[in-house]
Amino acid sequence: MRSRGWRGVVEPVLFLLAAALWLAPLWRDPAGFAFWRPAAFTDLLVSHYPNAELVRRSLTTWGQVPLWNPSILSGAPFAGDPLAGLDYPPYWLGVLLPAGLGFNLIFLIHLAWAGWGAARLAGREGVGRAGRILAGLLFAGTPKIIGHIGLGHLSLVAAVAWTPWVLLLAGDAAVSIREAARGWIRRSAAAGAAWGVVFLADPRWLIPSGLAAGLYAIWRLSRESLPGRREAARSLAAGGLAALIAAGVAAVLALPLLEFVSLATRAQLADADRLAMQLPAQQLAGVLFPELGGWPEWLTYPGILAVGLAAGAILAWRRNARFWLLGAAMGWILSLGDQTPAYALFEAAVPGAGLLRVPARFLILAALGLAMLAGHGLDGLTAHDAGRRLPREAIGPIGVGLGLVVMAAALGARGEAVPVGLVGAAALAAIAASWALITHGSAPRLLAPGVILIAIVDLVWVGFSLLEVRDEAAALSERQAVAERLGEAGGSQRVFSPSYSLPQQTASREGLELADGVNPLQLREYVEAAAEATGFDASVYSVTLPPLPEEGVRHDWQPQLDLDRLGLLSVGLIVSDYPLEPSALEGPEIVEGVHVYRNPEVRPRAWVEAGEVGGAGGEWARVRTWEWSPNRIAVEAEGPGTLVFSEVFYPGWVARVDGEHAAVERAYEVLRAVHLPEGEHSIVLEFRPWRVIVGTAITVITLLGVAVVWVRR
């Protein structure tokens, strides 16, 4: 009863407090934004904040949850965009609370959830209290995850936090099958539901977490002996059920996302694009000592006690050591991308693996493996009586400590600079080894608390080198004067910048709509149209439009602007950090050092063309009225002719002319259009994607089914 109370109440509180430690740089300003120290920007401000601002503005202004995002790229689907966060309830804290505070609370909750999940997973393997606490602390506080917070990877951190829970539930299902227990169905359903939630948080983590959970379930099933025919049949059924439940839970996002991806440039990733951020092999040396302030995507350091105690668990060949050693090795190998044959085999064997773009993120699985091994290692250290000789689990941390001390001394003797990270890791390892030697014989009860404290100091030290807090007002007001001037001058016109001169977070606060933007998913036809209008190479995949030059965001890449094509996209204002051609642009006006131009060829947001659309010498006339919201556009216009909307064509938009259904067609390859007969007409466009409706129904039914199965046991 005391154990259950500890794990049910005290452990979650403990990991909440630990999460606050990992986010310690935010203490001085809880409403500020966490940045990786060298970074000029963070995805939290570039993507997540504008998305939350859109939802907030749409609810308060139009009383609707936006399914379409007009803020960037001249408009794109919002339902179906994983970064929108509509389908993962915790993301709504960023909408309902003040921006910085809400996002920081999301990070805090998920770090605690990750730690508690890893602790529960270790406990399920028989690890004692101290060992499972250490495992949870090492996983949730691993520098790579903290570094991703600095990069603003909100969705990745949230999805990663579910990983130990998916493994825990998958392992429970496997054990139930092995022991012929009745609960294997409900446990399989729960594992599938958790896996589906991973997809809702970040679809990119579905494959890594599913791979780890599947291998873990196989290990738990076959650990004692190979499964018989009945167990094998139940295992296949359990796997199928889990996959089915996961698909059902994920359907609300998966169905519209599949359509979005099929029409986006992401589906055309080249090998160079997919492997652009694989881990350089030499970075694996960082497992032993941290690169303070290093780039988070390549951080391999899991904490020196994670390495030392993991080595001890392996040397002692602790129960489950083989699986977690293989798990860590798999994470390291896959993070190297095409530097080993393993990644090609992985892509060939796993459907959808070709859409993953950052192999180095498999390092998170390596960190989980080391954290679990370290928990087993500490458990072995504390399980021995004080009078007995020092256990084999102590050899690992002592050996690692001595090795680092020798390495630092050798570099110093050769007159070479000794990295601060190496000195710090060596010192901490030496202190931990000394503490283990001293307390094991004289005060064994102090061994585990001391080791855990040293691990916390290590992780907090490295975390401080990665994160800094920046004031909310300053972070959200970059180029504020430019945004205000554009708001005064533009009306409903869009803004385009070849140099990202108007940050997305600032534009969102002013309600400005951009023809450029940053998003991993970009509609292929829009990218091609924008390339023709501005002169960039559309064949190169980029998360930014236009693609950022290698020389830097403000580098002049000599854009070739076609004002007529930009005008069709309702781009009336063009801003740049450098002078632009052609001379037909009006201006510039200089605001905060930014060149602000007007496009004399700008079209309104809707117009009626007589005759063939885009024909030579074709005339056009403005619509009489214009009423706009993200999911609905209503106009009054006079026919005959073609009503052209300066809005991106996409499946799911339906039209009514005078209350009667009408076809939504293409104009200028990328815009929406509706044919009008002669006379005055009321036209309504609404975004009603059937995939969102069907997906929502499937998800709700699936969740209800899982709840019924779980309650009925």
Image (tube, rainbow, N blue to C red):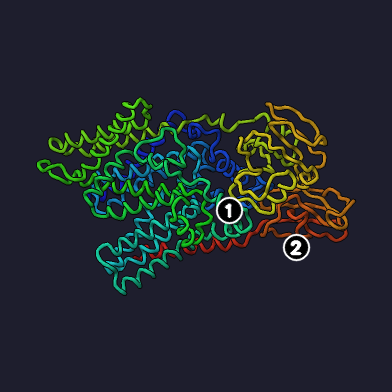
Q: Residues within 10 Å of mark 2 (few under 14, many from 20)?
A: some
Q: Secondary structure at mark 2?
A: loop
The amino acid type of the residue labelled 2 equals Ala
Say whether residue 259 is left or right of residue 88.
right
Q: Residues within 10 Å of mark 1 (few under 14, many from 20)?
A: some
When asked about the image quadrant of residue 47, the answer is top right
Q: Is residue 219 above or below residue 511?
A: below
Residue at x-position 84% and y-position 48%:
622
Q: Position of residue 67 (x, y in %)?
A: 62, 52
Residue highlighted by disc 1? 270
Res 702 label: none
Count of labels shown? 2
Q: Position of residue 475 (x, y in %)?
A: 56, 32
Q: Position of residue 454 (x, y in %)?
A: 28, 34
The amino acid type of the residue labelled 1 equals Ala
- Could you say which is closer to the camera, residue 4 or residue 494? 494
Quick check: marks 2 and 1 in contact, CB under 8 Å? no
Residue at x-position 77% and y-position 35%:
581
Instruction: Give whichever of discs 2 and 1 has the lower sequence position.
Output: 1
Q: CA distance from mark 2 to mark 1?
A: 36 Å
Say whether residue 218 is left or right of residue 192.
left
Q: Secondary structure at mark 1?
A: loop
Residue highlighted by disc 2? 663
Q: Is residue 129 visible?
A: no
Q: Position of residue 695 (x, y in %)?
A: 55, 61
- Could you say which is closer to the camera, residue 369 or residue 596? 369
Residue at x-position 62% and y-position 62%:
690
Tell which residue pokes out farthest to the left in this image. 387
